[in-house]
Image (spheres, rainbow, N blue to C red):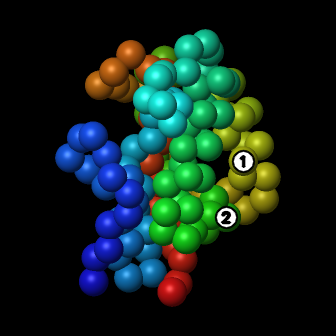
Amino acid sequence: MKQTFGSSHVPLSPAVRAGDFVFLSGQVPARPDGSIVSGGIEDQTRQVMENLKAALALADAELSDVVKTTVWLVDARDFGGFNKVYGSYFESAPPARTTVESRLMIDIKIEIEAVAYKPR
């Protein structure tokens, strides 16, 4: 059984539960009002991580439930700053992760999607 959580101004669900797994759509460095965080990779990563936490909460899950993330960076040279902030959110038992350099759909530096395991 699939259950969707949240709404968006684009055709996607921020979080979808499928059994014991929660799949999050890619989160970008947008504030709750929709404005994009300006500044460097650290500020943008921090906002993305807060957005991941908010999307997880929609499905009654937390960052500690995340088992896999996929990260897109516009510039691989931002990896160090990204990794510093990302690591502060996963201090113990970090999830599996794939990180790639890619052009993104809007003018941002980072996007992260996640999969969480949260038994009902």
Q: Distance of mark 2 from mark 1, alpha carbons?
A: 9 Å
Residue shown at the point (52%, 84%) measured from the top left:
119
Say whether residue 99 is left or right of residue 85. Answer: left
Amino acid tagged 1: Tyr
Residue 94 image position (x, y, % from top left): 68, 57
Q: Reading the chain from its start, which is encountered first: label 2 or label 1?
A: 2
Q: Which residue, given by chain and number where applicable, does mark 2 sit on?
A: 64
Position in image of residue 63 (x %, y %): 63, 59
Q: Nearer the viewer, residue 34 or 68?
A: 34
Whether pointer 2 and pointer 1 mark residues with C-beta atoms closer than 8 Å, the reply is no
Q: Is residue 118 left or right of residue 26?
A: right
Location of residue 39 in the rendering, given as x and y in whole percent from the top left corner: 61, 13
Can residue 87 be seen by looking at this rendering?
yes
Residue at image point 59% right, 53% down? 53
Residue occupied by mark 1: 89
Which residue reaches farthest top? 39
Nearest the camera: 84 or 77? 84
Mark 1 lies on a secondary structure that is: helix
36 up-or-down from 30: above or below: above
